């Protein structure tokens, strides 16, 4: 009888131990699930990690400011407020220069390419860039998403002064890569050639493309965006959309075709004038004749 009781007790402790183990693992899984979003921002230059920005570093930064954004593009143009650091204060070592670019990558493959000239000046007559950082209590969720605009978001004071477009407000930023080279050396495959007066509209269209479309689309596989399809390979949209329909698509993609997971948002006339849209179409038409895979020697 005594033996039986002992046996029962030892089985019981084994059972309790197992129960504890299960409980422990269950909690572990939960804890790691909640901290999955990256809270550091990696800064890369010449393929090397040069800086790691963290919440506590930014929160204690002497140039921290509280910024009111009257129309926040990430939050359906609603007013929002952020703790943010002037972008220029984070990169004192980088010189203002039209041939230095910041390639800013988001978690979803959205990639903005912004010149150091635009991001690093302190001229109050122009729009000034700031890096907003998400506090531990988190920003609200973006509409139609289970994510916030955090952990890092590039915002602008007085965006109207330099005509800053919605594509220039990258959110959910994970890396910033500093590239010191001209746009043509960085991405030769997106340049229309030969450069002549006859195709000056397409030259202007190139810049319209870089500002508005390059964030989500590659062209001739140049660029690092991975949200939308390449706009020249294997086929250029001017080869299968009538010009009128392509323009309509860019203004309002849902008026051409629609489905629940559609991601591209149309460009209205304030974001892209009729003239810029025509320049963009001429650019795409010229590029259809210049299909080129990246030069693998580089
Ligand atoms: C926010 C990201 C984003 C931006 C900015 C963007 N696109 Fe798109 N685009 C997409 C995605 C994603 C698709 C695939 C369809 C979808 O999910 O909406 C797409 C599809 C397209 C298509 C249709 C291709 C096909 O064959 O179905 C064309 C053409 C196009 N985009 C052109 C442009 C042009 C031109 C611009 C710049 C004025 C631009 N896009 C800006 C994300 C974007």
Image: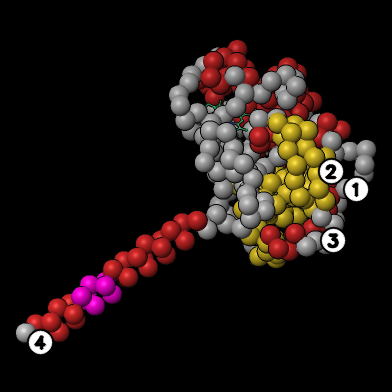
Residue 17 sits inside the magenta stretch:
yes
Give the crowd class for mark 2: few <14, some 14-19, many >=20 residues within 10 Å.
many
Residue positioned 47% across, 61% down in the render = 31
Q: Which residue is mark 1?
A: 122
Q: Looking at the image, can residue 162 be seen?
A: no
Q: Which residue is mark 2?
A: 128
Tell me whether the residue at label 3 lies in contact with that at label 4, contact meaning CB atoms closer than 8 angstroms.
Answer: no
Residue positioned 50% across, 28% down in the render = 262
Depth-wise, is mark 3 or mark 4 nearer the camera?
A: 4
Tell me whether the residue at label 1 lies in contact with that at label 3, contact meaning CB atoms closer than 8 angstroms.
Answer: no
Badge 4 marks a residue whose secondary structure is: helix
Q: Quadrant of residue 11?
A: bottom left
Depth-wise, is mark 1 or mark 3 nearer the camera?
A: 3
The extreme left residue here reads: 1
Give the percent coordinates (x, y) of residue 169.
71, 39
Residue positioned 19% across, 81% down in the render = 10
Depth-wise, is mark 4 or mark 2 nearer the camera?
A: 4
Nearer the observer, 39 or 275: 39
Q: Is residue 63 left or right of residue 255?
A: right
Q: Which residue is mark 3?
A: 62
Nearer the observer, 107 or 26: 26
The residue carrying mark 4 has its beta carbon less than 8 Å from ligand 1: no
Residue 34 sits inside the magenta stretch:
no
Give the percent coordinates (x, y) of residue 76.
66, 30
What is the CA distance from the residue labelled 1 to the residue labelled 2? 7 Å
Q: Earlier in the sequence, mark 1 or mark 4?
A: 4
Ligand 1 quadrant in view: top right
Q: Which residue is mark 4?
A: 2
Tell me the magenta residue range: 12-18
Tell me whether the residue at label 2 lies in contact with that at label 3, contact meaning CB atoms closer than 8 angstroms.
Answer: no
Q: Earlier in the sequence, mark 4 or mark 2?
A: 4
Nearer the observer, 184 or 196: 184
């Amino acid at each position: 009888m005594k033996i039986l009781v002992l046996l029962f007790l030892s089985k019981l402790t084994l059972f309790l131990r197992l129960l504890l183990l299960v409980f422990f693992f269950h909690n572990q899984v939960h804890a790691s699930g909640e901290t999955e979003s990256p809270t550091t921002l990696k800064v890369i230059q010449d393929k090397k990690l040069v800086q790691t920005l963290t919440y506590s570093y930014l929160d204690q930064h002497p140039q921290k400011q509280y910024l009111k954004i009257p129309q926040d593009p990430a939050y359906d143009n609603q007013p929002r407020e952020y703790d943010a650091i002037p972008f220029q204060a984070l990169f004192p070592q980088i010189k203002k220069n039209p041939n230095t670019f910041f390639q800013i990558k988001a978690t979803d493959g959205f990639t903005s390419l912004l010149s150091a000239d635009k991001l690093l000046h302190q001229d109050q007559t122009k729009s000034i860039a700031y890096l907003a950082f998400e506090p531990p209590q988190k920003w609200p969720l973006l509409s139609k998403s289970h994510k916030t605009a955090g952990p890092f978001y590039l915002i602008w004071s007085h965006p109207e002064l330099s005509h800053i477009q919605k594509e220039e407000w990258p959110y959910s930023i994970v890396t910033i890569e500093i590239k010191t080279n001209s746009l043509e050396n960085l991405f030769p495959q997106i340049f229309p050639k030969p450069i002549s007066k006859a195709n000056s509209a397409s030259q202007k269209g190139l810049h319209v493309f870089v500002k508005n479309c390059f964030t989500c689309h590659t062209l001739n596989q140049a660029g690092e965006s991975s949200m939308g399809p390449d706009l020249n390979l294997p086929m250029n949209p001017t080869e299968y959309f009538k010009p009128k329909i392509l323009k309509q698509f860019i203004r309002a993609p849902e008026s051409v075709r629609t489905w629940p997971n559609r991601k591209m948002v149309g460009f209205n006339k304030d974001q892209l004038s009729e003239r810029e849209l025509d320049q963009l179409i001429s650019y795409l038409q010229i590029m259809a004749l210049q299909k080129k895979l990246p030069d693998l020697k580089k």
